[in-house]
């Protein structure tokens, strides 16, 4: 075909393509272009298409939740304002987003790892600020908290490079480039096994290979259900991990708002790990957050099992609900509201409930019987639990018992109750219950210090586990 | 304190990566000074198993860092961060002439990395490793779109990067083995270049009509790229390997329709009639068939086919007329094709014509013919089915270390 014909053909196709953008009609000769997404965004840039778009990269583009992702842009105009925005959907379908304002360098580049954000969801040089700085999009349901339900699939984050310093959810934006990053709670090769057939409501995560592995029992708080995302991460670090549900789960006995399982249940769960052919039986530890902290201490001192180490995060040394029997079962949580307080927004603060003086005395664990290393993590802005006072009590008791060397404390100013694996957003408050009335509870924690606490604590927890379970 | 080998910790980070990204394999908490073997196992799509292994000694901290420490033996020696991947070989007992090529680029390569006690050389399947991890190696980044293209009679696949574009484009041509080979185009799209993998030998048209494609076939492929709303028509490159370079040279110098921004030619030659069709090129090769040799292992060596290179411009693409940047990549141990000699001749032609400023020449000693994306295993010889469907083994040369892939 002669060059002239080719040019005419190209011009005709170009015009057709423009009409396509305007009318959103599919012409037959361009039928295979109908698979293209986001054609609307092209209309702004169509005429300026003489240079390729700026180049945006994220490394690694498939990362484990605790791995840093480095975002770089190049082929941008020098000394120019740009906005980096991130959007993703939670497993429940809610949209979470964040953004940061940068200025490109003299060579038209920027790096999220090295450069300072001058506006947006975070300020300053925060390599992972775009991730822990995420918030529910405007118009979202109230009181959301980001928690991964399905750990076998990643979060998919669309990271966009936008022109100028803009607020993506409010302003008109021009997307210059985009990259999709995946954030995983599970490494390749980690296996997930339901434990229900043993009468234990939990999920067991096994690292790849024959083992045997050190192991961890993973406990959460009164929020209930089966939360798998920390156990799956621990398995990704080489620990066989069992996340255990004990309240608020359809497969557990009794009503969902009280603890209907006793010491024998927790003992059986611990032994499920211990006796597993791929677990090193004398290298099993326990990690517990909030009420799970009390459960951890109770297992270690009352059930006869011998954990190799314990990690307690922001939790009490006794039950925050009256016990209904000597096995540790409790009354209904909401019936014990004596120590609940409220802020001026009507958010409920549970902190006073777990002051050692307010705990039911018969529930307080015999701390002097603790016989293994214990790491206690305090968020100093914890509004849900009296973490400092409980940490003090453990420390004092162990000192009096001649075992001060067993106790390690990590304490983080500005961090709240929910000290979780790193780089996820903190919920300063979130929905606690909908019945009998809608209640939002205050967890505490401010974004930047809480994020720093999560990052530091996770590394120290892993070091602690390696030191105690791999020796 | 005695350290129990049970407590060895193994990690490979990142555990999910693109095929051309590096990882760090770390063994920790081993007995200091102990002998360890790090092992990699991969089962490819056709079910064959490949393995690599290396011998290390744990340092005073009980650590082995594969990126920093020296392998004392195994399928690679010395400090080779990615040796566990590029030195993968078919396990003992495998059928000869295997080559690892990923057909389905939408799923990752899974590699199981383990650490064993002692310096082992075989029997890995029968032993329990001290620790194991699994890594995923991907040809496609998330968000890259794979679009089969059959318009205009083409057999091709378009890979579009994530994002709005517009993107530079690339036409990706493989060699005489034919087939629609997607993995390099997928990887390029994962780096921001919209790439079209094109089958021009075993495409639907050729299989049905038994004819070779005309120049128009390549022009249509170019058009698919040039007229795509997310691709810049003025920023299209062509990348050819082996026989694909013959098309690339001809296009870069003579085509009135295809305007290349730049050209990359790997392991190829300019030895062919001026401005010829694919059919004419193949006939030219066949006319020299008497120059084909066999080595002691009965492997075919084709490199003499186009030698000697004449000093005049008979049957040589006139690269002195090229107007766009040209990147030539050759392996000096290429047994399959006379790529090195051709590159030297092209350099001379361009110097004489005064356009050698457009030429970048990368010449790798001890590298062979199949210079592919990094960190994948090289084979010295493999099964090759040529156009007349004879099964033969051809020798490609040895490549002893990995290197980065440039466009």
Image (cartoon, rainbow, N blue to C red):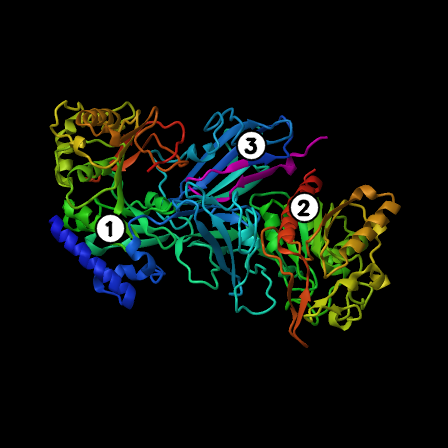
Q: Which residue is mark 1?
A: B226
Residue most extreme to the front: A79
Q: What's the residue at 62%, 49% (across, down)?
A: A234
Please give the residue where the numbered disc 3 appears in the rendered image: B65
Chain letter, disc 2 residue: A
Q: Of B243 and A303, which appears nearest the observer?
A: B243
Give the label, 3 or 1, closer to the camera.
1
Residue A124, percent across and down? 57, 48
Tell me the quarter of the picture where residue B360 sits.
Answer: top left
Residue under pointer 2: A461
Residue B21 falls inside the magenta stretch: yes
Q: Residue at x 27, y 54 (%)?
A: B228
Picture layout, residue A1 above or below residue B263? below
Along the polypeptide, which appears first: circle 3 or circle 1?
Answer: 3
Q: Position of residue B16 (x, y in %)?
A: 48, 45
| In the foreground, B103 or A462 | A462
Under circle 3, the secondary element is strand
Q: Secondary structure at mark 1?
A: helix
Label ID, residue B107: none
Pinpoint the chain carrying mark 1.
B
Q: Please say whether residue A373 is one of the residues in the magenta stretch.
A: no
Front residue of this view, candidates B146 and B105:
B146
Q: Which residues are magenta?
A: B1-25
Query: Badge 3 local density, few (<14 within 10 Å), some, or many (20+)?
Result: some
* Disc 3 and disc 1 in contact, CB within 8 angstroms: no
Q: Position of residue B98 (x, y in %)?
A: 35, 36
């Amino acid at each position: 075909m002669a060059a002239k014909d080719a040019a005419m053909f190209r011009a005709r196709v170009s015009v057709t393509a423009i009409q396509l953008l305007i009318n959103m009609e599919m012409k037959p000769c361009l039928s295979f272009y109908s698979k293209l997404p986001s054609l609307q965004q092209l209309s702004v840039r169509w005429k300026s298409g003489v240079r390729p778009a700026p180049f945006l990269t994220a490394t690694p583009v498939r990362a484990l939740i605790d791995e840093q992702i480095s975002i770089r842009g190049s082929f941008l105009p020098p000394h120019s304002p740009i906005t980096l925005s991130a959007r993703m959907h939670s497993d429940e379908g809610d949209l979470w987003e964040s953004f940061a304002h940068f200025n490109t360098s003299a060579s038209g580049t920027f790096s999220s790892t090295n450069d300072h954000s001058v506006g947006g969801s975070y300020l300053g040089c925060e390599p992972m600020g775009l991730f822990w700085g995420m918030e529910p999009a405007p118009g979202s349901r109230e009181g959301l908290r980001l928690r991964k339900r399905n750990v076998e699939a990643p979060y998919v984050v669309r990271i966009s490079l936008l022109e100028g310093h803009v607020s993506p959810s409010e302003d008109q934006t021009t997307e210059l480039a985009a990259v999709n990053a995946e954030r995983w709670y599970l490494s390749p090769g980690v296996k997930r096994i339901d434990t229900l057939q043993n009468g234990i409501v939990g999920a067991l995560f096994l690292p790849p290979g024959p083992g045997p592995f050190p192991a961890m029992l993973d406990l959460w708080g009164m929020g209930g259900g089966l939360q798998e995302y920390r156990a799956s991460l621990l398995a990704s670090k080489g620990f066989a991990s069992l996340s255990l549900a004990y309240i608020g789960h359809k497969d557990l006995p009794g009503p969902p708002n009280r603890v209907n399982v006793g010491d024998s249940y927790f003992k059986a769960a611990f032994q499920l790990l211990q006796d597993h052919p791929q677990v090193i039986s004398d290298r099993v530890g326990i990690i517990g957050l909030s009420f799970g902290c009390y459960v951890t201490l109770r297992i270690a001192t009352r059930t006869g099992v011998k954990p190799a180490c314990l990690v307690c995060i922001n939790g009490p040394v006794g039950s925050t609900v009256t016990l209904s029997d000597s096995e540790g079962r409790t009354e209904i949580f909401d019936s014990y509201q004596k120590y609940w307080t409220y802020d001026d927004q009507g958010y409920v603060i549970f902190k006073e409930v777990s002051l050692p003086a307010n705990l039911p005395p018969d529930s307080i664990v015999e701390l002097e019987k603790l016989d293994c290393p214990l790491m206690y993590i305090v968020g100093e802005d914890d509004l849900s639990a009296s973490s400092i006072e409980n940490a003090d009590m453990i420390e004092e008791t162990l000192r009096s018992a001649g075992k001060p060397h067993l106790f390690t404390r990590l304490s983080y100013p500005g961090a709240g109750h929910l000290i979780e694996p790193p780089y996820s957003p903190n919920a300063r408050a979130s929905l606690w219950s909908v019945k009998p009335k809608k209640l939002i509870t205050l967890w505490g924690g401010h974004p930047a210090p809480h994020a720093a606490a999560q990052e530091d604590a996770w590394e120290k927890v892993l070091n602690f586990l390696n030191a105690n379970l791999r020796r | 304190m005695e350290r129990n080998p049970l407590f060895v910790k193994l990690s490979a980070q990142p555990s999910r990566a693109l095929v051309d990204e590096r990882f760090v394999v770390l063994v920790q908490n081993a007995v200091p000074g102990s002998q360890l073997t790090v092992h990699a196992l991969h089962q490819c799509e056709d079910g064959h198993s490949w393995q690599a292994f290396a011998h290390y000694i744990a340092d005073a901290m009980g650590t082995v860092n594969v990126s920093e420490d020296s392998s004392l033996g195994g399928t690679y020696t010395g400090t080779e961060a990615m040796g566990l991947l590029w030195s993968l070989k078919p396990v003992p007992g495998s059928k000869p002439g295997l080559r690892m090529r990923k057909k389905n680029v939408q799923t990752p390569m899974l590699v199981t990395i383990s650490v064993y006690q002692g310096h082992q050389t075989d029997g890995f399947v029968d032993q329990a490793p001290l620790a194991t991890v699994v890594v995923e190696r991907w040809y496609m980044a998330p968000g890259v779109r794979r679009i089969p293209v059959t318009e205009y009679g083409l057999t091709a696949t378009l890979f579009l990067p994530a994002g709005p574009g517009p993107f530079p484009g690339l036409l990706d041509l493989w060699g005489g083995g034919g087939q629609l080979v997607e993995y390099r185009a997928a990887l390029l799209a994962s780096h921001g270049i919209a790439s079209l993998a094109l089958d021009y030998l075993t495409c639907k048209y050729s299989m049905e009509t038994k004819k070779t494609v005309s120049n128009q076939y390549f022009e249509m492929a170019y058009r698919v790229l040039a007229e795509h709303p997310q691709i810049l028509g003025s920023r299209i490159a062509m990348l050819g390997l082996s026989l694909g370079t013959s098309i690339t040279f001809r296009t870069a110098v003579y085509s009135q329709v295809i305007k290349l921004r730049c050209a990359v030619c790997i392991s190829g030659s300019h030895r062919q009639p001026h401005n010829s069709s694919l059919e004419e090129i193949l006939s030219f090769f066949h006319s020299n068939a008497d120059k084909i040799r066999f080595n002691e292992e009965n492997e075919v060596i084709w490199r003499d086919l186009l030698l000697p290179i004449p000093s005049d411009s008979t049957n040589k693409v006139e690269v002195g007329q090229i107007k766009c940047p040209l990147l030539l990549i050759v392996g000096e141990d290429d047994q399959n094709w006379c790529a090195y000699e051709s590159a030297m001749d092209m350099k001379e032609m361009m110097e004489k014509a005064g356009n050698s400023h457009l030429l970048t020449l990368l010449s790798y000693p001890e590298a062979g013919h199949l210079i592919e994306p990094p960190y994948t295993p090289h084979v010295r010889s493999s099964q090759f089915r040529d156009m007349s469907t004879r099964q033969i083994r051809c020798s490609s040369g040895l490549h002893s270390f990995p290197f980065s892939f440039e466009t």
